[in-house]
Image (cartoon, coloured by chain):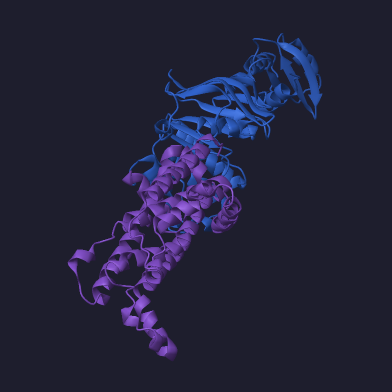
Chain colours: A purple, B blue
Amino acid sequence: MLHLLKIDLKKLTSYRTFWVVCGLYFLTIGFSTASGMEFLKWLANTFDKFGSSLNIDRIPLYHFPDVWLNLVWWSGFFKVLLGIMVVISISNEYTYRTLRQNIIDGLSRWEFLASKILTNLLLSLISVVLIFIIALVTGFIYTPEINWNYVFTDIEFYPAYLLELFTFLSYALMLGIFVQRSGLTIILLLLSYMLEAIVKANIDDYFPWLIPYFPMESISALVPIPFYRYAFQEIQDYVDPAAVAIASAWMILFNYFSYLKLKRSDL
Amino acid sequence: MDTVLTTKHLTKDFGRLRAVDDLSFEVKRGQVFGLLGPNGSGKTTTLGMLMGVVNPTVGEFSWFGEIPNHHVRKKIGAVLEHPIFYPYLTGQKNLELNAMIKQCPEENIPGVLELVELADRRNDKYKTYSLGMKQRLAIASALLNEPTVLILDEPTNGLDPMGIAEIRELIKKIAANGKTIILASHLLDEVQKVCSHFAILKKGRLVHVGPVDDVGKGAETVEVKADLPDFTEVLMQFPGTASILPENGVFLVTLREDFHSKDLNAFLIERGVVANHLVTKRKSLEKVFLEILSEPR
């Protein structure tokens, strides 16, 4: 397994686009999650009214245990950048025809796919670890009184975040394998949420129970929007097991469809 | 002799087009096997099936008597159609990647780069290479895992005469090491120069298979010239003469079966005639090829 991951990393690590896109992604999620408090302070200093009407120190953005969910939810928005990288990586294999050559050279079709899936897993894991460390550090900095009972409450959102990323990247990979052209695939990837929203809006009146089963919906449902707790005092501080089951099923299906397509096509 | 490759009723349909039709042949160890045919006759599709990138519609094949799988492919070095590499990687890195895929030691890389004379360009990106260099890198990559079988598809496509000669020498050098080579080409001259056996494909069907040496068999033709006024009559007296055709001051003598050019030479010397030009004309593969292809099927 490690061997296959090394093969794909060898392709990527000398590819400048990979460093640019991944660099952008990790810098964005890193800085934006770490600097939320500084941003609020800046807002307070710049706009007089903002500071006086709201005591920013009382906003528990970075307080344990809220920080876990807050940061994970926020950084989830940027996964589309990673998705674009995955699309570029797979569609390159088609445009350069290196997929064909890899098979000729002795990789099985499954091994080829596995090398891509393993890279998806690695990119997801790095994101999770990065956000975890940032949450841990910022939590200790901004929480007024550390109560050890709360420090590690709610970290179950991290496995959920991992599943969110990995399922989304599996989707991007599958899209790339079916469409094979990077431009078109990236557009489809970006439109996925919108297309699904249109379908959901139309279906809402007739089959509302179907909504949670949509792929993008299930991915989003893994990490719920945290701010309701501030507005409505209504808290979902657990990972919905149904959402995990649905998203896992999609994750398996996406990769299985990729495998079927790859196995049957003439390269 | 052990069999390297066997195909049985190999067939491939692309929609309504039958690209390869009921192909059955064998390649033995040590052969240099030429796969001939006009453009679009199914050569590359056949090789694609043999290398696992095209799924056969019907039929089967086996490498070394084994059911084909990706482990077998690691023992085969293959270049199909164009050289394919990652353009943004250097030649060296591309080969390192290939070594990882083929699971062979990276220590083989300098040797093959030396063989194809690319050692001094190994740290340049692949996309900066000329076509000839790309072809040579592809051959280096095919040789990387010290394969027992080498598959080359139009290896001299788009090369200049010098490049063609270099690749031809390279193939001969590799064949001399006892490697089995399958060479797809439409350059007949090339196949005749390097191959021991050949097969001809026409619209996906196998129309001929046999040793290259058989091409020259059959009636021999001798081109002969002597400064003698009644040379035709002398030639007529030779018991092996079947027909004589004067052409540009020389005579094309077609011999009867079991007579060879040396018999004619001996006869002339016996008669005190010294020929100042005597050449055995072998039937060229090109002629055979065109003959076979023009046969209605």
Q: Quadrant of residue A130?
A: bottom left
* Residue A138, position as x, y percentages in the image: 28, 73
Please indicate whether residue A89 sits to the left or right of residue A5 in the image: right
Figure quadrant of the C terminus of chain A: top right
Q: Is residue B70 above or below residue A164?
A: above
Who is closer to the viewer here, A44 or A206?
Answer: A206
Left or right position of B23 against B219: left
Residue B127 position, x and y percent, is 53, 56
Observer-nearest of A94 and A164: A164
A27 and B75: which one is in front? A27
Total numbered badges shown on the rendered structure: 0
Report the residue that reaches farthest toward the bottom: A48
Above or below for A29 versus B243: below
| Pick the front one: B285 or B144 | B144
Decide: is B286 above or below A10.
above
Q: Residue at x 19, y 69 (%)?
A: A147
* Residue A164 visible within the image: yes
Please indicate, yes or no, whether residue B97 appears anywhere in the rendered image.
Answer: no
Image quarter hosting the N terminus of chain A:
top left
List x then y, in percent, for residue A45. 39, 89
Residue at figure coordinates x 37%, y 84% from the top left? A41
Q: Where's residue A155, x and y in %? A: 28, 59
Quadrant in the rendering for residue B63: top left
